[in-house]
Each structure stands twice: as structure tokens, then as C-alpha cells.
Image: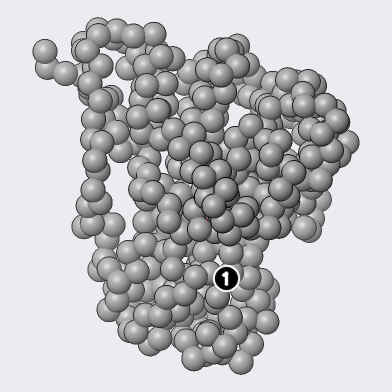
Amino acid sequence: MRILVDQNVPLVEEFFGELGEIVRLPGREITAEAVRDKDILVVRSITRVDAGLLEGSRVRFVGTCTIGTDHVDLDYLRERQIGFASAPGSNAESVVDYVLSSLLMLAEEEDFVLTDRTVGIVGAGSVGDRLRRRLEELDVTCLICDPPRAEQEGRDDFVDIDTLIERADIVTLHTPLTDEGEHATRHLIDATRIEAMTPGTLLINAGRGACLDNAALRRRLEQRADLRTVLDVWEDEPAIDEALYGLVDIATPHIAGYSLDGKMRGTELVYQAMMRHYGLPARRKLGQIKPDNWLRKIVLSGWAPPMEALSLCVRACYDVRRDMLGFERYRRRLGLAEAFDRYRAEYPVRREFSTLRVDLKKNTGDLRDAIEGFGFKPKLANK
Ligand SMILES: NC(=O)C1=CN([C@@H]2O[C@H](COP(=O)(O)OP(=O)(O)OC[C@H]3O[C@@H](n4cnc5c(N)ncnc54)[C@H](O)[C@@H]3O)[C@@H](O)[C@H]2O)C=CC1
Ligand SMILES: O=C(O)C(=O)[C@H](O)COP(=O)(O)O
């Protein structure tokens, strides 16, 4: 079999090598011509997979090593009986790490205490629900807006989007991008809702760029710079709005999910689905592959205020400023659109919080809970 795989997918030889000949291309160079004589296509989110790409090709299975599927015409694949798999949940932990790192950084810079703020989570799936659990471990009040879940589960503890915007100090978006149905999310946060945000609100988008009206956000920030903003995803990536980029507090090029762990899990999930599709045993396992972990543990030698200890662990493991400054360095050298793709292609190794062991002395009760609640691995030292 001939397999075409996006260049940003890790562990390709390890997982797909035994299936046939592998060809690798940058996601934006995966064209109809490149695909025509391939049997399997493995992409990430930047390749539009539809009739324009696949019609007349030999492709019988498509995998996307991502959670989002808005770049794939699923109806077309179904009609043509082409097998399909995505990687649900694969990098959800990593997105949560990104949001928590951003929150701690802004809390330090703006001198606020996270536990005094109400966080509104829009979309409570793999990402949003994990985020809620970690924040609640710290006693941060969360409001949840997820109408599809509220309907399916008959929940009356969720709120609607306008109530969330009215009541939350921090609004964080984790919805898929959808265009159809009662709960479509394109421009869910539109000009009216952006206007309704009270001054000082912190708005985070780590879902999909077009869930938020970027032009309307730019207008508000140009007129009154009274919102704090964290954007990882943008409309029209990689050709994002340069003026908006300059107005945002934390601007990153769609890397919230880019931990090595999340990417590797994405490859494994697609591999497993592909083997099922072809009726073959899935012998390769992620557990057999041990990536380098240059920072294995941190030792806290006594009690510390939990927020300070957390801040130390977060900065050591994944500090979002590394990506913000790295992206800006690339932008000055290459221009914004090229920097967007190049930074992602050359992304430095990043591990999830869950890979970092934090050694603690005995009797540090609330510290242990905070460390564990935030996603790290606490361990009580013998002495
Ligand atoms: N920035 C990044 O690097 C990454 C971004 N993503 C994006 O985040 C999205 C969410 O990821 P998961 O939580 O894993 O997906 P998920 O499918 O587990 O959860 C999405 C949740 O959004 C809810 N939802 C749908 N429409 C809604 C609406 N109108 N209002 C409020 N909630 C709504 C759904 O009911 C569901 O509970 C993905 O679809 C993807 O687009 C995912 C991974 C990485
Ligand atoms: O999984 C998703 O959904 C994402 O948004 C990915 O983390 C994005 O990665 P790329 O597809 O842009 O490499």
C-alpha cells in the first residue's frame, strides 16, 4: 500500500512502516495530484479533505491525527465508503495545560488571584470538562455552557452563552467549528456578544478560530483596549489578521494541543482505527516508545503557598510565554503567515504536565492536592 502522511505527524515509520511505502509532505502541499496514487491518507487539520482532493484517487482510508474534523467532508467520505478516523481526546490534556499556563501567567502579570475569578467554559467535552475538573480542584468557580450536552443529559446546572458572558470574569472557548444545526458555532461569539463583555473580561480561544468573530474583536480592542485576550486559533490561518495579532495579550500559532504526548497519541489512535479498518492486528503500542524526558521531576523541599508552587511547576514544564515569544521571533524574521506554519513545523519538544513528577515532603496536604489537581504527578518523599 502507498501511504501519504502529513510531515507534522510523529512516529510515522514506527506505526505505519509495516503497511507499505510512506510518502511525507507538508500539509499544505497535499494536493489531488499527490493523493491520486495513494491508498491511505493521514492528515492534520490544515489539509481540506473533500471531493476536490480525493475524487478519482485510490484512497480508501483517511485518518486525521487531530480532535477537530471541520477540515474533513465527512458526508463525502461516507458516500464514497472511504474509511475514516480522527483522534478524539488525543491532545485534550495539552490544551488544558495551555489554558492553565496562560491563566497563571496573566494572574501574575495583572496581579489577580485565580480563585477570586469565575471561569466560564464554553464547550464541556474532552477539553472543557478536563479544564473544569482541574479548576474545581483549586476551588475556582466554573460556569459551563454546553447546550448539546445540557439537552442530552437533561442538565439544569449549565448556563446559556449570554448568561455565561454576563457572569464570568474569564470566558474560554472549547467548541468544535460547526455550521449547521441549532447549536452551530461559527461566530458563536459575535460582535454583539463581544460588546456585551464587561471591561476586564479575559477571553481565551483554543477551539477553532471562526467560533469567534475576529474582525469584531479587533474593532473592540482598537476602540477600547479593555479586554484581555489569549488567542491560539484564528480565522484564516495562517494568513491571520496582523492588526488583531498586535492587540492580543497572548498570541500563539495553533499550538495549544502540540505536546509531544498529544501528537503521539493522535498517531496511535489513527493507527489503531486503520488496522481495524483493514482487519489487521494492531501490534504497535505507544507504551513501547519512550520519548526523552529531560525534565523528569521537581523536588519541593518544604511547604510553599500552593499557587506559588503551581506556578513554579507550570513554568518549569510548559510556560506559554515560550510559544508567544518564539512565534514573535519567527514573525520578525519571516512575516506573520510564514511564521505561523514554520513555528508549528519546528515546534520544540513539549511534555504534558502529567509527565512531571513533583516530590513533596510529608505533611504538605493542601499542596499535594493542588499539585495533583493541576495535572502533575505528586509523590511523597521518604524523608
Ligand atoms: N487549539 C488547539 O490546538 C486544539 C483545538 N481543538 C479544538 O477544540 C475543540 C473541542 O475539543 P474537545 O473538547 O476534545 O471536543 P469534544 O467533541 O469532546 O467537545 C466539544 C464540546 O462542545 C460542545 N458544543 C457543541 N456546540 C456547542 C455550542 N454551540 N455551545 C457550547 N458547546 C457546544 C459539545 O456538546 C461538546 O461537549 C475541537 O473540536 C477542536 O476544534 C482541539 C485540540 C487542539
Ligand atoms: O486536534 C486538533 O483538533 C487540533 O487543533 C490540533 O492540535 C491542531 O494540529 P494541526 O492539525 O494544526 O497540526
Determine whether, in the image, residue 60 is placed left or right of residue 280. right
Residue 283 location (% of width, % of height): 25, 68
The residue lying toward the viewer, choosing from 111 and 37, is 111
Q: Residue at x 82, y 34 (%)?
A: 222
Give the residue type that dot 1 points to: Arg
Residue 121 location (% of width, % of height): 64, 32
User: What colouring style does the render use?
Assistant: one colour
- 33 over 293 or under it: above or below: below
- Check disc 1 and report the residue beneath it: 28
What residue occupies the far left of the structure in this picture? 383
Q: Residue at x 50, y 58 (%)?
A: 342
Can the viewer see residue 146 in this picture? no
Q: In which quarter of the image is the N terminus?
A: bottom left
Report crowding for label 1: few under 14, some 14 to 19, many 20 or more residues within 10 A (C-alpha). few
- 190 over 89 or under it: above or below: above
Determine whether, in the image, residue 339 is placed left or right of residue 309. right
Determine whether, in the image, residue 18 is placed left or right of residue 82. left
- 260 over 20 or under it: above or below: above
Residue 47 location (% of width, % of height): 59, 69
Q: Which residue is drawn at 62% across and 53% down?
A: 336
Residue 55's quadrant in the figure? bottom right
Q: In which quarter of the image is the C terminus?
A: top left
Number of residue marks: 1
Determine whether, in the image, residue 44 is placed left or right of residue 203. left
- 269 over 130 or under it: above or below: below
The residue lying toward the viewer, choosing from 380 and 323, is 323
Q: Which residue is drawn at 34% across and 9% down?
A: 304
What residue occupies the far right of the structure in this picture? 192
The residue lying toward the viewer, choosing from 221 and 113, is 221
Residue 6 location (% of width, % of height): 47, 70
Q: Under tag 1, what secondary structure?
A: helix
